[in-house]
Each structure stands twice: as structure tokens, then as C-alpha cells.
Image: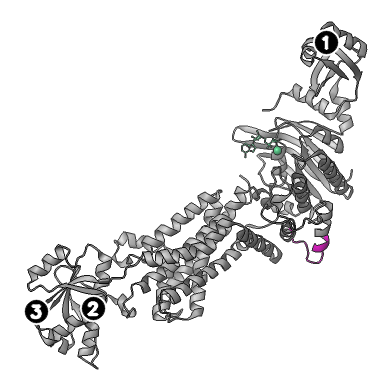
Amino acid sequence: MTSVAVAAEGLTKRFGDFVAVDGIDFTVAAGEIVGFLGPNGAGKSTTIRMLCGLLRPSAGRGLVAGIDVAADPEAVRQHIGYMSQKFSLYNDLTVIENLRFFGGIYQVPRASLPERLAFAISMAGLEGREERLVSTLAGGWKQRLALGCAILHRPPILFLDEPTSGVDPQSRRRFWDLIHSLAADGVAVLVSTHYMDEAEYCDRVALINRGKLIDMASPAEFKRTNLGGELFLVECRPLGAAIARLQDTPHLLDVAAFGNSLHVLVEDSAYDSESLTALLRQGGVEVSLAHTIAPSVEDVFVRMIGRTGGPH
Amino acid sequence: MRPLRLKAIAVKEALQILRDPISLVIALLMPFMQMILLGYGINLDVRNLPTCVFDREASQDSQALLKHFQASPYFRIVETPSTYRDVIRALDGGACRLAIVIPPDFSQRIADSGGSAVQALTDASDDNTANIAIGYAQAVVGAYAAEATAGAAARAGLSTGPLQPVAVQSRVWFNEDLESRNFIIPGVVALVMALVGAQLASLTVSREWERGTMELLVSTPVTPMELMLGKLAPYFLVGLLDAAFCLCFAVFWFKVPFRGDLLVLFLTTSLFLVVVLGIGYLISVAIRSQLGASQIGLLVTMLPTVLLSGMAFPIDQMPKAVQLVCTFVPARYYIAILKAVFLKGSGLLELWRPVAALLAYAAVIGFFAARAFKKRLE
Ligand SMILES: Nc1ncnc2c1ncn2[C@@H]1O[C@H](COP(=O)(O)OP(=O)(O)OP(=O)(O)O)[C@@H](O)[C@H]1O
Ligand SMILES: [Mg+2]
């Protein structure tokens, strides 16, 4: 990792008495993808908005491209591209009209505009849809167009606030491919998401809860250091009885339902698949499968949010 | 100020106007409807005004004058009382709205062509009609006197009566064909432009807030000044178009004579547009919903322009305090300019006072409008 593109130093935002973002510190390097993870109301959007100069920090500071955002938000704006959580392109304009508008706003030189427009359109996969009104596009197209508008001026720093929310899984994969190719060109990307599986696409994830940064690490490191136990996948029926049976068992750290199965977290080497199956059978639960699995970020996330208190 | 940005904003705004039914209705339909409704609705024309004539001379001359009144479409002689008491009874009872008293020495006075020749009494309950009626009566007497003293400097005055003192109405001077419409229509044009300009501009920033596009716009390097100028540019063109339409309507439909210079009209109209667009923009920045902003826009333009601009009610007849308030109504100056340009053919030099007032207004509004928009979400 080379130069620091974004740095938050004790970044804080208060709305009246309510502390939405509470002294957050982190950095994003050029070419790095940092994922912002956290439950609703954790303070992800507020942090991003402060870094874009849309909200004034109550304390601490944000350095974007080496510039203090609070001191000179306008200077920061040429260097950033922003996708807000709520779609905010012009629905009553066509695809190409939106792109042209942002091209003009960012003063993309006339000579390079056609090439940039063409790049944005092909990147977003919107060829042949240039004249469509944006209001008639489906979610995935809209989000990719928004990304296209945000990178027209080739900003070295991108802030993407839940860019894949409400987008089907296939479009989401495609969207992440785009983010990766931008990062490969040296763009620093700060991206918030609700989808835990997307954390695995990031170079580092920052877990935020109740305005505080709880942990920041690569997805692998994050899982290794934060889980604090062994994870089992258990397929059994009925789930309710199984959860009830496991809840007050010694050395058992956590139980969570994942679809039709359970993720059971136990202290290291306290149980193996057989002893866990036996334990459940004693409680009259029918067990069809039980084995250890590699934890996902979601497992860690659920566990950590449980430890630090749920959403506000 | 970057030309590329200004152009991008202006083009975007123009496209949005073209695709927004509300804006289109305001820009295209409203001026037409308002010109028709207000042009005909606010009609202070006095026609067939019930009039009684007390002829105290009963000479050939006074009968000739009476004929002039009868020939005029504005008066209908309903009574010819023979005593003052009857005159007053007729006025009080509402049988007539105007009474003309021809003095016993009428012929002599006309021959002397000086002083007041005829007394006019009106029912003062309707000030406006009274003023107009007296203006017309004066013109009839004037026309007669001019005829009677052919060649002599014809200037007929009206004596002032005990019921209603009559000041010489200089306004009638330039309106020799006696159409009150000539005074009303320029006011209507100003009103329509104020309404359309302020209404359209009031939607422009509030639309961005309402549709959630502001968040992204604020994150770009656009400056408040660029945003304002870029956004208002297409509305300025629309406003000029509407002004041209209204003014053509005034000339070709309502037959208001146009004696002035088109360039003067264009410059002053542009100035007035800047003022009303600025007002609308200020409202739009302050209020984040389109409906709220347009309602406020309607309120702050419609009421003062109708009531306090001299459009329908002469300012010089208002109480002093209200006259002071009128000083701050921009339409007042534009209406004065329009009347002067249309009816008198005045040039910029003669109009320096109202033009200076509008310039000052535009400067103040522009100053605040350029600073009103803050690039923050809070
Ligand atoms: N302008 C504001 N005024 C008052 N409170 C606010 C404001 N903006 C955000 N908040 C509060 O701050 C907290 C953090 O909000 P924020 O939008 O940053 O959360 P988030 O992590 O982005 O959540 P989500 O995943 O739902 O988007 C929330 O409780 C929210 O209600
Ligand atoms: Mg958010």
C-alpha cells in the first residue's frame, strides 16, 4: 500500500445530543478497497458525508487527498467521486444527458469527453440505452450509471454508499468487478454495504457499530482474530428446540440460525461434531449433519454486534 | 465562473423544464390564461355610466355640450334635474353616478377659455370609477371646448364642487381614446411576468431537494454562483418569451397603443425579469418543497403586485404609510415604465427613476440570491 488517500482522525458527528459518529480513526490507501460494515444507523453514511464535505464534523478531522475537508471542502470535491445511498441522478433526464451533465460540472475537457462518455457507458453496460430516461432503468443499471457519473472526471478517490443495495446478486457481482478494476488503476475506494458477503471483496473491512469503529482488518484477519472459537454448521430439526437446547450449555459461545441450519460457535476444542450431535439428540432434536466450517465475515459480524450491543 | 459548468446546468435545467408538466403549464399556459382573465376581469372601463346633467344655462352652447355627452359611449344621461337638490338626491339615491352641472355663464366661460367651466359631482364610494368618470367627463368637455374655441389653446378645466373635489387627472392626458384598459393592461403584463417568473424560479432549487438530487449536486465542485446563473438562464429566456407574448397580446389583442422604443422595452423587461427570477430563486433556496415554494412565490408576487403597484389602485391616493410600502414593490416601477413606454413613448433618460429603482432592486436581490445557497446538507 502506497500513499494515504483518505484519513479520518477522531472524526465525530453529533446531531444535538445524539452522537452518530464517535471518534473514528482509519485510513484508505491509494488503490485500496475499504468496506464499511455496520447495522442500520451505525454511522456509515454520516462518516462518508463528512468526508465528502457534505456535513461538517463536530470534532476530529478528515483528510481527503491530503486536504482537510472541513477547512476546504471545495478543494476536496475535484478529487472525489460520490455515490449517495439514495439514488440521486436525474430521473427525468436520459442516460447520456446525465453523463453529459456531470461531464460539464466536472469540466471534463471537450476533447476527451466523447472517450470518457463511451468508457462510462461501456463500463456500466449501457450501450444502446443512451437515450433511455433514467426513470425507466432497473436498479442495477441505475447504480452502474451512478458509478459511471461518479468516475467521469477520473477521481483518485471514490466514496460509494451502499452502491449495491436493492440490486440483484448477478448485478452485484458485476458491480464489484468494476470496483476492483478501478482500484487496480490506483483509485482509493471507500464503500459501505449491508451485504456481509461483499466484505470478502474488500482489501480491508471496517466494522462500525453505534458510531464507533470496532475493528478494521483484512477479511481473513478479521475472521481469525474476532471469532474466538470454532464454528460448526448443524443441520437439524426443529430449529427452535435446538436453539433452546444449546443456549445455556457450558463452553458454547453463540448460536445463530442461517436459513434452515444453525451456526454454532463453541470454545476452541470444547466439542467435536459427534459430541455436539449427541448433545442435540439428548434434547430430542433430529440432526442430519454437523461439521466445522470456515467462518464468513457475517458470522464474525453477528458475533461482534452481539458483543457490542445491537443497533440503536 | 466556468463556461462548461454554466452550460451543463443551463442545458439540464432546460431539459427539466421541457419534461416537467407543471413548469410547462406555468411557462406556456399561465401567461395566456392570465392575460385573458385579468385583461378582461380587471376592467375599469366606464361605459354607459348613469349620468345626470343640470343645465343652468340652457343655451345653444350648453345643449351642444350635452350632445357631446350623449354621443360619448361612456355616459348615459338618465336625468336632467332642474335644481341642485334634485342633483344630490339623484346621486345619493344611486340613480346616477356622475352629475354634470353646467353653470349659468357657461358660454361666457368657454369664450374666455379660462378657469373652470363645468362642475362634476361624483359618488365617491367608488373612487376608481369616480376618477375615471371625471377624467372622461373632462375629456368630453375639453373636446367640446377645443371645438368651440377653434384654434385657441384649448384647455378645459373642471371646477371643484362641494361634494367631491376634483383634481385635474393628468393620467387621462396620454390616454386620449379614453380606454382605462390602456392603463390596466401594462399592469396585467407586469403581474403575469412577476407571477410566472417567481413561480418558475421558485421550483428550481426546491426540485433538487425534493427529488434527492441535491446531495450529489452538493458533492460536486459547482459554485453557488454558477448554480444560480446556470439555473436561471433558461428561465430568463422563458420569461422573455412570455414577456414578448404578453406585450404582443397587449398591443394586438387589447389594442394598447405602443409609442415607445422596442430596445427600451427589452432592456427594462430584462431588468424586471432579473428581479422576479431572483425573488423566486431566493424562495426556492429557503423552502425545500416545490409546492411550498411556489405557494410562497405566488403570495409574495401576487398580493403586492395587485394591491400595491398602482396597477388597479392609484398609489397617490393611498395613505402615506402604505405609499411607503409601495416603494418596495418592484412591479410598481416596471408598470410605471411600461405605461410610459407604451403610452408616452418615453426613453431611458426620462425613465431613469424607475429604472434606477429596478437596478437597485436587482442588485440587492442578486447579492442575496448568489449567497443564499449553502453547499451543505444541514
Ligand atoms: N441529519 C441528521 N439529523 C439527525 N440525526 C441523523 C441525521 N443523519 C443521520 N442521523 C442519525 O445518525 C445515525 C447514523 O446515521 P447513518 O445514516 O450514518 O447510518 P448508516 O450507518 O448509514 O445506516 P444505514 O445502513 O441505515 O444507511 C442514525 O441513527 C440516524 O438516525
Ligand atoms: Mg447509510
Chain of the residue where label 3 is placed in the rendered structure: B
Question: Percent position (x, y) of residue B356?
Answer: 46, 71
Q: Nearer the viewer, mark 3 or mark 1?
A: 1
Q: Residue at x 82, y 43 (%)?
A: A171
Question: Percent position (x, y) of residue B243?
Answer: 50, 70
Q: Is residue A110 shown in magenta?
A: yes
- Report the residue marked by disc 3: B56
Q: Which residues are magenta?
A: A106-115
Q: Is mark 2 within 8 Å of ligand 1?
A: no
- Report the residue marked by disc 2: B138
Q: Secondary structure at mark 3?
A: loop
Separation of residues labelled 1 and 2 (CA atoms): 110 Å
Residue A285, label in figure: 1
Amino acid type indicated by mark 1: Val
Amino acid type indicated by mark 2: Gln
Within the displayed image, which quadrant is ligand 2 positioned in? top right
Task: Name the residue nearer the viewer: A282 or B117.
Answer: A282
What colour scheme has been applied to the protein in the rendered image? one colour
Q: Is residue A123 shown in magenta?
A: no
Q: Secondary structure at mark 1?
A: loop
Q: Secondary structure at mark 2?
A: helix
Quadrant containing the N terminus of chain B is: bottom right
